[in-house]
Image: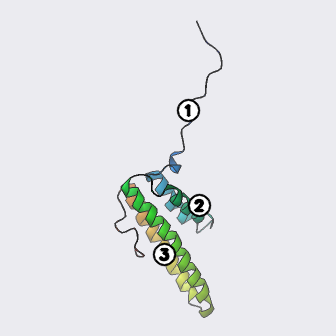
């Protein structure tokens, strides 16, 4: 007997980049870097980091803590630099903050690619 009736659709696979893990961490870092062109992507990145914090492997947890701290510290440095624009030294603060963000994201991307943890995720430094 041949059953040609309607078939149930195959189960939908979730998007891997939303699940906690290597790909998700890399997406967060890329969102941070793309914020230099489209500012809102950094907020999307930190939301993804907060949503996946506490999930995944131990090495992934260090990346989420690193990414969350990178966002908030960069925001703090950005506000301080904006206030210092009155003294005309805020421009240097913006440049230093941008370099700091890029370096932290590149370090994070490299370690995530090798599936290594961030050695000191609560550090303000690189």
Distance from label 3 to label 1 (Cα)? 44 Å
Q: Do labels 3 and 1 touch, CB within 8 Å? A: no
Residue 99: give its label: 3
Q: Is residue 51 left or right of residue 39?
A: left
Distance from label 2 to label 1 (Cα)? 28 Å
Mark 2, residue position: 44
Residue occupying the point 57% across, 86% down = 90
- Which residue is the extreme one toward the front? 54
In depth, the one of 55 and 59 nearer the eye is 55
Q: Secondary structure at mark 3?
A: helix
Label 2 packing within 10 angstroms: few (<14), some (14-19), many (20+): some
Return the disc, 2 or 3, that comes first in the chain's sequence. Answer: 2
Q: Secondary structure at mark 1?
A: loop
In depth, the one of 69 and 40 nearer the eye is 69
Return the disc, 2 or 1, that comes first in the chain's sequence. Answer: 1
Residue occupying the point 50% across, 75% down = 73
Q: Report x, y in % for residue 14.
A: 54, 42
Q: Do labels 2 and 1 touch, CB within 8 Å? A: no
Q: Secondary structure at mark 2?
A: helix
> Compared with residue 31, is residue 89 higher up or lower down, i.e. above or below?
below
Residue occupying the point 63% across, 65% down = 40
> Compared with residue 29, is residue 10 higher up or lower down, i.e. above or below?
above
Distance from label 2 to label 3 (Cα)? 21 Å
Mark 1, residue position: 11
- Which residue is the extreme one toward the top? 1
Label 3 packing within 10 angstroms: few (<14), some (14-19), many (20+): few
Q: How many marks?
A: 3
State which quarter of the image contains the N terminus. Answer: top right
Label 1 packing within 10 angstroms: few (<14), some (14-19), many (20+): few
Q: Is residue 121 left or right of residue 15?
A: left
Return the disc, 3 or 1, that comes first in the chain's sequence. Answer: 1
């Amino acid at each position: 007997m041949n059953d040609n009736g309607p078939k149930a659709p195959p189960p939908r696979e979730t998007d891997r980049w939303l699940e906690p893990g290597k790909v998700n961490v890399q997406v967060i870092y890329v969102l941070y870097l793309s914020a230099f062109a489209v500012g809102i992507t950094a907020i999307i990145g930190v939301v993804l980091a907060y949503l996946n914090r506490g999930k995944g492997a131990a090495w992934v947890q260090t990346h989420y803590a690193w990414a969350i701290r990178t966002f908030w510290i960069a925001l703090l440095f950005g506000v301080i630099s904006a206030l210092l624009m009155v003294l005309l030294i805020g421009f240097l603060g913006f440049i230093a903050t941008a370099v700091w963000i890029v370096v932290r994201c590149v370090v994070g991307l490299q370690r995530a690619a090798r599936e290594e943890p961030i050695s000191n995720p609560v550090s303000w430094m690189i």
